[in-house]
Amino acid sequence: MHAIQIDPVILHLGALQIRWYGLMYVVAFVIGGHILKKLAQSGFLKIPENKVDSLLFWCLIGMLVGARTFYVFLYNWDHYSNFPMEMIAIWKGGLSFHGALVGIITAMFLFAKKWKLHFFHIADCIAVCGSQGLFFGRIGNFINHELYGRATDVPWGMIFSGGGPYPRHPSQLYEAIFEGLVLFLILLLVSKKTKYYGVVSGLFMGGYGFFRYVIEFFREPDVQLGYYLGGTTTMGQILCWLMILASVGIILYAYKIKIPTSKNSDLASALK
């Protein structure tokens, strides 16, 4: 049994706080920008290298708006309806991955339309960045003492502030490993085999949906939502099933339209 001793706040500057949670997102976007620039140099991402920062900015805005909107209105409206000024306090945590995904998809669609590209040209590259970003995001959740797991007696159980005196599954770390690192490696391996854009982004959605669905059995459900479908399923799991179904449709559509990837460039080789 281990108690988490890391202070979520790195530095206090008067009323301003610099938190590990926010820093993890900064790190994820810096690394994501580096990956996208390498993909642009290789020709896999079909935009000029100097437009990568613009793409990242569009995705950042889409992610924040979507993630916060879903969390406020779908996951915790009872609280925020009483404290509306807290809706913008994202530095305290409270972002929905599924909302972030909707926001980023919207941003990618608009960006692809502007540059007259197929959506899949952008989506496959962002999927790879997203998987590594999930790793850092979940580490931020861990340090922020949020989204912890259910009570457990396993030797690696941890005590989180706000989670009572009982050791709990560090489900944030489970998600960081599987939704982040493992999924990232799977996408790189698949990119070596597939010949068409869209397969990697479809697999990202399905892979995330599968890993998140399984880990939800170890994660404490949102107290304001609880369980659905007879007390067996969380809201996260319902959304994951939708993601898995969507991923099947995306992959089938990718093989139907058959947009070929660059002949001499796959994601794995481009990132070397």
Image (cartoon, rainbow, N blue to C red):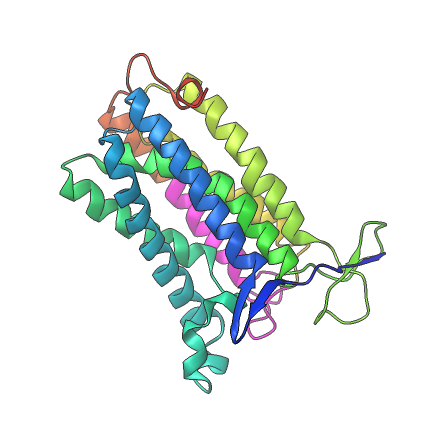
What residue is shown at x 24% (from left), y 24% (from top)?
259
Question: Residue 264's spot in the image, x, y percent?
Answer: 32, 12
Position of the N terminus, as image quadrant, is: bottom right
Q: Is residue 230 shown above or below 46?
A: below
Question: Does residue 5 belong to the magenta stretch?
Answer: no
Residue farthest along the top direction in this orientation: 264
Residue farthest along the bottom direction in this orientation: 82
- In this rendering, the count of numbered labels is 0
Looking at the image, residue 16 sits to the left or right of residue 221; the answer is: left
Q: Is residue 187 shown above or below 158?
A: above
Residue 253, visible in the rendered structure: yes
**Residue 260, quarter of the rendered image:** top left
Question: Where are the magenta residues, as a range?
Answer: 221-248
**Residue 41, quarter of the rendered image:** top left
What residue is shown at x 30% (from left), y 28% (from top)?
40
Residue 202, visible in the rendered structure: no
Question: Does residue 224 belong to the magenta stretch?
Answer: yes
- Give whichever of 88, 257 is nearer the camera: 88
Looking at the image, residue 130 sits to the left or right of residue 103; the answer is: right
Looking at the image, residue 126 sits to the left or right of residue 221; the answer is: left
Question: Residue 181's spot in the image, x, y percent?
Answer: 57, 36
Question: Residue 184's spot in the image, x, y percent?
Answer: 51, 33
Q: Is residue 67 shown above or below 49?
A: below
